[in-house]
Image (cartoon, rainbow, N blue to C red):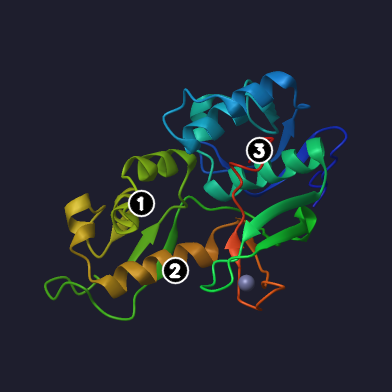
Amino acid sequence: MAGSIENWAEGRLVLPGGILDASGNAHQTVWVRQLTGADEERLAERKYRNGAHQVTDFLTHVLVKVDGLEPPVTEEQVAGMIIGDRDYLLLRLRQIALGDKVEQVLRCPAAGCGKKVDVEFLIGELAVRRTERVLPEYEFALAETVWPEDETSWRGAIRFPTGGDHEAVLAAGDNTAAANTALLSRILVRFGSRKALDVEAVRNLPLSARQQIIGFVKRLMPGPDLTVEIQCPHCGSDMTYPFDLHAFFLPNG
Ligand SMILES: [Zn+2]
């Protein structure tokens, strides 16, 4: 793939998914500028509605252009980027600005241990799932029909969740089931013979159907795998955790 090679010194990055334009074409090559103190201040700012909104504002300032799209990069475009692409940009920007190595101190969660553990890993070691060409929607099939009156209600289609979806999900609060309901009602573009499902219809889906659809999205979505696998050196307990991208840019994060 000509032109799809990254050049960190020049700020050229290749998204693992891509930005879809109005005609459904995906654009993967983007250009970022060097981070400055103003960006650091933006990341420490508390004025944002939530973390996803903050990432949108940050990336809108840092993205210079997207090959194949008319500049400047707008906030609307960044909010429309899939979550995995946004995470990928945060990871690479951190690597370019502050280096590959991450050092954190975590506490072992095992009862009876609770000791401090120094965690150290390289961002470059985190796996990134890439797709050749991101599509506007993806069809899935469930193991069983959901509604007896609709014989096609075992299949549907989703689109990948975006930064805008992430914002809406965070607005749903700490309840992860409510967050899944909010997410599914946004990303389901078709189910059975219906065009889309509202929040109430998603809430009434069988648990197994919801889990199959969420699992489908997780298996397919391009982007970095933020799982850091470690064991407590004191007691051997599994301390595997998802790396917090939003916090790690901050000096005390
Ligand atoms: Zn331990």
> Which residue is under mark 1?
183
Q: Earlier in the sequence, mark 3 or mark 1?
A: 1
The amino acid sitting under disc 1 is Leu
Which numbered disc, 3 or 2, marks the residue closer to the eye? 3
Q: How far apart are marks 3 and 1 (CA)?
A: 31 Å
| Nearer to us in this view, 96 or 131 | 96
x, y percent for residue 147: 16, 72
Task: Report the quarter where the C terminus lies.
Answer: top right
SS assignment at label 1? helix
> Which residue is under mark 3?
252
Q: Distance between the residues labelled 1 and 2?
A: 13 Å
For the question of whether residue 225 can be seen, the reply is no
Bin the neighbour count of mark 3 within 10 Å (Cα to Cα): few under 14, some 14-19, many 20 and up: few
The amino acid sitting under disc 2 is Gly
The residue at the point 80 percent across, 33 percent down is: 11
Bin the neighbour count of mark 2 within 10 Å (Cα to Cα): few under 14, some 14-19, many 20 and up: few
The amino acid sitting under disc 3 is Asn
